[in-house]
Amino acid sequence: MKFLFTTAIAMFLSLPLMATEQTNHSGVHTPNACLADKSVCAHLMFPKTPNSTDESQFIAHFLTQENVSLSQVHAILWMDDMGHGSAPVEIIAKDNSHYLIKNAYFIMPGQWQVKLKFNANDVAQELIIPVLILE
């Protein structure tokens, strides 16, 4: 069983990054963002499409190699083109790989980044996940 799980994770991590969002029964998923060595990847799952007028709540889902330990997970909303972010968000660990992000306000339409900052095996890391806010 462990072999099947490890094989499934290895196959998933080797897939090429998708260029567009996926929408399915469980919400809107962003493409994966990965560290250069692919030891940690993450994507976001929004239960509903985020907008510039309502609070967004979403899940940051981390996929790690078996020997990687995550700690000190933080999320920052940033609009690179405008040079500003949004108010700090609240983050709640649901388990070792799922983090609920609340009080997230994408305050204007445009291209945003969700910067996930964390320690992987006690080394500071960052993944940047683009999020397009249309309205």
Image (cartoon, rainbow, N blue to C red):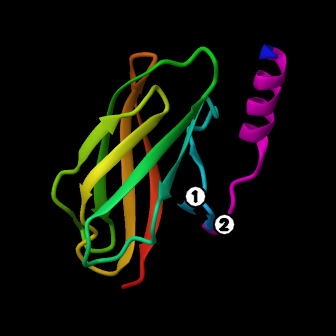
Q: Which residue is mark 1?
A: 26
**How far across and how far down the image is residue 55, in percent?**
26, 66
Q: Which residue is mark 2?
A: 19
Mark 1, secondary structure of its residue: loop
- Marks 1/2: CA–CA distance: 19 Å
The part of the chain drawn in magenta is: 3-21
Which of 99 and 26 lies nearest the eye of the viewer?
Answer: 26
**How far across and how far down the image is residue 50, in percent?**
39, 71
Residue at x-position 36% and y-position 85%? 135
**How far across and how far down the image is residue 36, in percent?**
60, 38
Q: Residues within 10 Å of mark 2 (few under 14, many from 20)?
A: few
Q: Does residue 85 appear to the left or right of 2 in the view shown?
A: left
Which of 109 and 38 lies nearest the eye of the viewer?
Answer: 109
86 w.r.t. 70: above or below:
below
Q: Amino acid at mark 2?
A: Ala
109 w.r.t. 114: above or below:
below
38 w.r.t. 115: above or below:
above
113 w.r.t. 49: above or below:
above
